[in-house]
Image (tube, helix red, strand yellow):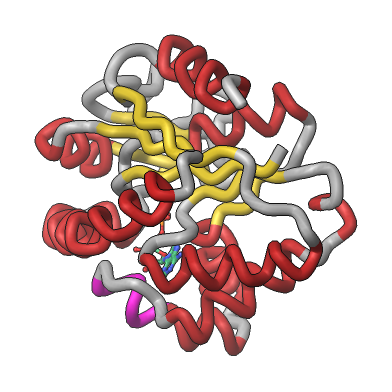
Amino acid sequence: MRFVLLGAPGSGKGTQAKKLMERYSIPEISTGEILRKAVAAGTPLGKDAKGYMDRGELVPDSIVLGMVHDRLKREDCKKGYIIDGFPRNEAQAMALDKMLAVIGAPVSAVVSIEVEKKELIKRMSGRRICRFCGQVFNVHLLPPAKEGVCDKCGGGLFQRDDDREETIRKRLSVYESQKAPLIAYYEKKRILKSITGSGSVSDIFKQVCDAVEDK
Ligand code: AMP
């Protein structure tokens, strides 16, 4: 099971990927999360990526491709994985296929989660994350019982730098500009399923599971 989740920032890819990871016992590979960790740890990769991320731009392929390649080579990916946030453009999709061709294990399903722009802005601008356990809340849609405090572990909540309105708009326009060729690439391969990403997390999860299992 080698799944790719496509969708705009804020479409819920990360949430769905974590649920898929539990259901199928395969790892989630989130390029955004790997990059954020590298930035927080101040590694050379993080230092190179930070400016692009703060501006809401894509980190150059020369940085991201090596990172994904290293991750896919790890032992835990042998039985499958869910990639979320990658590929972000056609060149990355082609590079992914090349990497996988070497091991003879192509992507088995690609699910695109579609959400309206207005809703995406609401989700991202309201997103707050627990510093300790990573639990995600939303001040508009899923507020914590006590403002600024995680319901699960009591940790403090923070807003991602790139979840501020200016950067959100930039990230969405970058996504829109790359979306059509990426979707066309996977449509041509007949492995793309599009689903509606509004509604409850569990309803969307059901659609995602139906899509990946219909193979
Ligand atoms: P995300 O959490 O997936 O929205 O990613 C946060 C930021 O990390 C993006 O706005 C980009 O700057 C960077 N990023 C994540 N994945 C990629 C990728 N596949 N290619 C280029 N940049 C990426």
Where residue 173 appears, x then y in whole percent? 15, 59
Q: Position of residue 136 (x, y in %)?
A: 46, 34
Q: Where, quadrant-wise, is the C terminus in this rendering? A: top right
Q: Which one is nearer the viewer's eye here, 186 or 204? A: 186
In this picture, which residue range is highlighted in magenta? 50-55
Quadrant of residue 166 in the image?
bottom left
Image quadrant in which the N terminus is located:
top right
Answer with left or right where residue 164 lies relative to residue 32: left
Which residue lies at the image location 48% right of the left edge and 42% below the top edge? 5
Looking at the image, residue 82 sits to the left or right of residue 14; the answer is: right
Indicate whether 145 appears above or below 13.
Answer: above
| Residue 65 x %, y % | 57, 76
Residue 73, placed above or below residue 42: above
Residue 52 magenta: yes
| The one of 172 and 164 positioned closer to us in this rendering | 172
Question: Looking at this view, is 93 or 84 the one in front?
Answer: 93
Q: Magenta stretch containing residue 179, yes or no? A: no
Q: Residue at x 46, y 40 (%)?
A: 190
In the rendered image of this protein, does residue 171 appear above or below residue 130? below
Instruction: Where is residue 150? Give x, y as percent.
Output: 49, 30
